[in-house]
Image: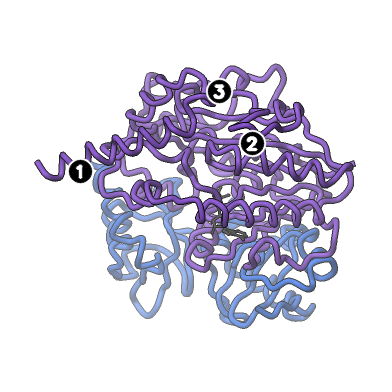
Chain colours: A blue, B purple
Amino acid sequence: MSVNLLKNDELEQLKDYCLKHYGLNYEVWAEVSAIKTKDAIWLVNHQAEAFLCHEGVNEEYESIGLRCFSGVCFPYKITDGFVKIFDNEIKKKKLNLKESQARAMLKGESIPYEEVVGHDGYNLLFIGNTYLGIGLKKGDQLISQIPKALRSQLAKDLEIRNE
Amino acid sequence: MNRNHNMMNAEQIFHNLFTERYRDLIPDFDQFLVSLNKPQPIGLRLNTRFNDKEEFIKRFKLSSSEIIIPISEINYLEVPSENNWGGALEHHLGHYYIQALSSLIPVLSLNLGSENDRVLDMCAAPGGKTTHLAELMNDKGVLVANEPSLGRRRILKASLSRMGVSNCLVTMKEGQNLDFPKESFTHILLDGPCSSEGTLRAPTLRPNKKKDKNYLNYNKEFRKGLHHIQSELLEKAYSLLRPGGELVYSTCTYDPYENEKQVDLLLKKHSDLSLVELNLSSPSPWDSFLCDGVTEYRGEHYSSELTKTKRVYPHQLNSIGFYVSKFVKK
Ligand SMILES: C[S@@+](CC[C@H](N)C(=O)[O-])C[C@H]1O[C@@H](n2cnc3c(N)ncnc32)[C@H](O)[C@@H]1O
C-alpha cells in the first residue's frame, strides 16, 4: 500500500475532531505519527515511522501500527484500534449499556437511541468496565458496528456468563 | 469397528514413526510416548496492557488447582479446556492470547526493551510470538512482522489489532527475499516453517485432524524442501542482523536435521556468529524443563556448542515439543 504521513493541516483537523468528540487532549498525540493510506489512517510510534521512511523504504507493507480511522477525512470513523491506542485518554462518547442493550448490540440489532444517553456519530460501547465495540448513532437508532463475524459468538458468551 | 481399526492403525504408525526416528535421541522415550497420549493443556498468555493476573483469575472464577503451571512469574495461565476461550468477549478484546507454554521460550530468550530495538519476526503468523514481542518491547522501537501466506497474514493482522499492538509493520514476503538493507535489525526471531512434529499428539486424541494425516505422509522430499527453506531463511537472517545483535532460531519439531544440523551449518559458515545460552532468567526456573541440544544424530556430529541450544519435550514440560537456539553476532 502507498504510505504518506498526514500533512500538518490534516493532522490538526484530526486532533481538533478528537478533542471535540472524544475529549482527547493534544498531548496524547506527541507519542504517535499518523500515516495515511488509500482508505484509512494508521497510528504508529515515531521510531517505526522513521524506519518506514528511511531503512524500510524498499519493502511493501500491509499494515502499519494500528488502523485507527477508516476513511481519511471528516467525518472520521474511529475503529477498535483507536480505542486500544488511546484507551483511558478517551473521555467522551462512552456509552454504558445495560445487559439487554449490550446483548442487542452483540446480536447486531439496533436499539432506539433515546434508551441510551449519548451523542451523534461513533460511540464507544461499554458494559461495566468492559469495552464491547463501537456503535453508530444514526437518526434515532444506535447501530452496532461490531464486526459481523464476532457478534453471535460474543452474544453467546455474554449469555453463558449470565446463566 | 472399521473406524476403530483405522484409528488403531494410525496410532500404531504414528508411534512407530517416532520410535524409528527418536528412540535413541529422546530421553525417557517410553515416557515421551505416553505423554503423546495425553491431551495438550490449554494455556493463555495474558496481555498485561489490559489486565493483571489476579484480576483475571477472579473474573473467570478460576480455582488455584486449575492454574498450576511450573513458571509462576510469567503472565500465563493453564485453564480448563471445556470453556470456549476462543469465543469469549475478553479474547476478542485482546485480553489474552491462546498459546502453548513452550512457544513463549523463543521470545523470552531475546533481551528486549530499548527504544532502539529493531526487531524482525521473519515468519510471524498467526502472531503468538509477534504479540508477545510487542508486549516485551512496551510498544517502543520497531517490530517488523513478515508472513508470506495471505490467509495466515489475515490472522496475524487480526491478532495484532486485537492485542492493541502499535509498533508493528507487516510485510508479505518469503523471508529469504526480504528487501531490507543488510544489518537492519538488532533482534531477529526466526520461528520458521518446520515439520511441526512437536504439535502432534496421538491420533485418537485428534480424530479427523488433517495434520496427523499429513504427518504420516511426510516423506523425504518434503523434509528436504523444508531443510532448504530453513537454511535460506537462516542465511538471510544472518545478513539482516546487526553486529552485536541477537538471532533466535526456533522450530516446533524434534528433527535434528531441521534443528541442530541447520544451526551447525550456519555456525560453520559465519565465524562472527556464536551460540549463547537462552538466558531466560537467572536462576532459570525453566532449566528443569529443558534438555540440551544434541551433538550427534544418525552418525552425524555437530559442534559441542550445540548443547547451548535447548529442546522441549512434552513428558518434561506438558506443552508442545520445541527447539530453541540463540546466536549473537560479533
Ligand atoms: C511455525 S509458523 C510461525 C508461528 C508464529 N511465529 C507464531 O508464533 O505465531 C511458520 C510460519 O512461516 C510461514 N512461512 C512459510 N514459508 C516461509 C518463508 N519462506 N518465509 C517466511 N515465512 C514462511 C508459514 O506460512 C507459517 O505462518
Q: Secondary structure at mark 3?
A: loop
Distance from the alpha carbon under mark 3 to that under mark 1: 39 Å
Distance from the alpha carbon under mark 3 to that under mark 2: 18 Å
> x, y (%) of residue B84?
32, 44
Name the residue tied to disc 2.
Answer: B324
Label located before the other in sequence (1 or 2) = 1
Crowding near the residue tagged with mark 2, few <14, some 14–19, many ≥20 C-alpha atoms within 10 Å: many
The residue marked by circle 1 belongs to what chain? B
A103 vs B72, nearest the viewer: B72
A23 vs B23, nearest the viewer: B23
From the image, state whether disc 3 or disc 2 is nearer to you.
Answer: 2
B85 vs A8, nearest the viewer: B85
Q: Are marks 3 and 1 on the same chain?
A: yes
Name the residue tied to disc 1.
Answer: B6
Q: Amino acid at mark 1?
A: Asn
The residue marked by circle 2 belongs to what chain? B
Residue B202 placement: quadrant: top left
Q: Is residue B160 toward the left or the right of residue B23 in the image? A: right
Above or below, comparing residue B266 to residue A149 in the picture:
above
> x, y (%) of residue A34?
71, 70
